[in-house]
Image (spheres, rainbow, N blue to C red):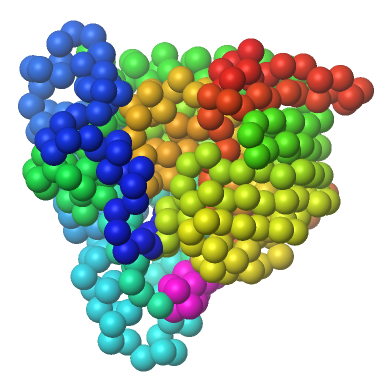
Amino acid sequence: MWGRLWSTVPKHAKRLSGKKGATPRGLENLMTKHAGGLVDTLSHEARLDRLGEVAVKVGLGLKPGQELVMTASIDALPLVRRITDHAYKAGASLVTTLFSDEEATLARFHHAPDQSFDIASGWLYDGMAAAFRSGAARLAISGENPSLLAHEDPDKVSRANRARSKAYMPALSLIAGFDINWTIVSFASPAWAKAMFPDDPEDIAVAKLWHAIFAASRIDTPDPVEAWRTHNAELHARTTQLNARRYASLRFRAPGTDLTVGLADDHEWAGGASTAKNGVVCNANIPTEEVFTTPHRLRVEGHVASTKPLSYQGTLIEDIAVKFEDGRIVEAQARTGQSVLEKVLETDEGSRRLGEVALVPHSSPISRSGLLFFNTLYDENAASHIALGQSYSKCFIDGASLTPDQLAEKGANASLIHIDWMIGSGEVDVDGITPSGEAEPVMRKGEWA
């Protein structure tokens, strides 16, 4: 879900950041729109503590006696500590945090022998999988430098990612299958902030990014936990409507796009809070604005153009244009990052097929911010999107009880990857195609019809 590679900050990032020290109008609106005057009265430390509370109570729904396995960069230590506090207050039996260090990551690419890049710490991921099987929850803090590996050998980056994906699969399958409660939240690292606001001093850039994170995560509302209850109810109402229609496919039309996405048999729309197989209600993404379901891996036809760049593993892939036949990408082009896109598509048999389709209104708060975050957790919630790779079992009726073979029979895709990229905008129309072939408007000009 994450990415990096460009030698200079792209022109669209500079355009969005405006003058040095300035705040984009959309972001300024996000910073001031919430009720209660909390933007002016809450300190940064108070907001950070609220984010920790939301991560535990809303994101994880952590239960007394549960262990928590957390991963984070060392930059995120202030947020890690607050999440740890709230986890123990919620009754966690043990919180274990695994830290990463970007300088150490670069040292590997600069000095490690070539064969190093085909190796991953399988013992570590086996241990994580064992923790999840024993009932532990999972929390990831994102916020890494989106251009960390910009100047490294793409072949080594690809090999390292492939090795990690294979080693991680025992743990990832439990996450993707929603066997456990899990969530992702973000920390405003200096490197990420400077990628978004390159013309600002570092402290101003970090402050702007924090404002955007807090606003998108509903931290600046009078009661963030209650605000999330309301938002989840709205997303659930939308999924209820879509599930009632039982569309056979969705058709996306826009400049550069005419794509029909057949939906898997017995697919189910999801969005907002979900109940994991362990019975715990969690919000897997903080923030989230999407409703999503599973495409049929064999029933995608047509062509589609991306509407936002994809930041993936050190590469900024811009202006993606692909053609599908029988569910498989048969042609793929990108203005930048073409070689990395090709390596992604060569990952495995399922990497050229879709595992998710999601609808997001163009008026979503993250879209209105006017920002490109270079972070899929945020950018995917600014626009409707599709994802290459692995499907989620939760997006099937009674998916929790289905075996991998049964899911595959219904159209689910399997892959080592799950990469979201954005195809929505204010120009996209979406029709739902009924089993009898009739078209019904679902979105017009990027908004719910």
Residue in view at x 73 percent, y 38 percent? 259
Residue in view at x 53 percent, y 39 percent? 307
- Which of the 4 quarters of the picture holds residue 2? bottom left
The quarter of the picture where the C terminus appears is top right
* Residue 157 lies in the magenta stretch: yes
Examine the rendered structure and indicate whether residue 79 appears above or below residue 104. Answer: above
Residue in view at x 68 percent, y 19 percent? 442
Can I make out residue 151 in this image? Answer: yes
Examine the rendered structure and indicate whether residue 98 appears above or below residue 430. Answer: below
Horizontal side of 268 relative to 319 (left or right) equals: right
Residue in view at x 42 percent, y 14 percent? 230
Q: Which residues are magenta?
A: 154-166
Examine the rendered structure and indicate whether residue 308 appears above or below residue 151. Answer: above
Find residue 337 and report its horizontal and vertical position in percent. 49, 62
Horizontal side of 299 relative to 397 (left or right) equals: right
All told, the count of numbered labels is 0
Find residue 243 and report its horizontal and vertical position in percent. 70, 22
Find residue 346 and report its horizontal and vertical position in percent. 64, 69
Camera-side residue: 45 or 96? 45
Q: Main secondary structure of the magenta part?
A: helix
Can I make out residue 181 in this image? Answer: no
- Which of the 4 quarters of the picture holds residue 282? top left
The residue lying furthest to the top in this view is: 36
* Residue 92 lies in the magenta stretch: no
Camera-side residue: 295 or 379? 379
Find residue 68 and report its horizontal and vertical position in percent. 33, 49
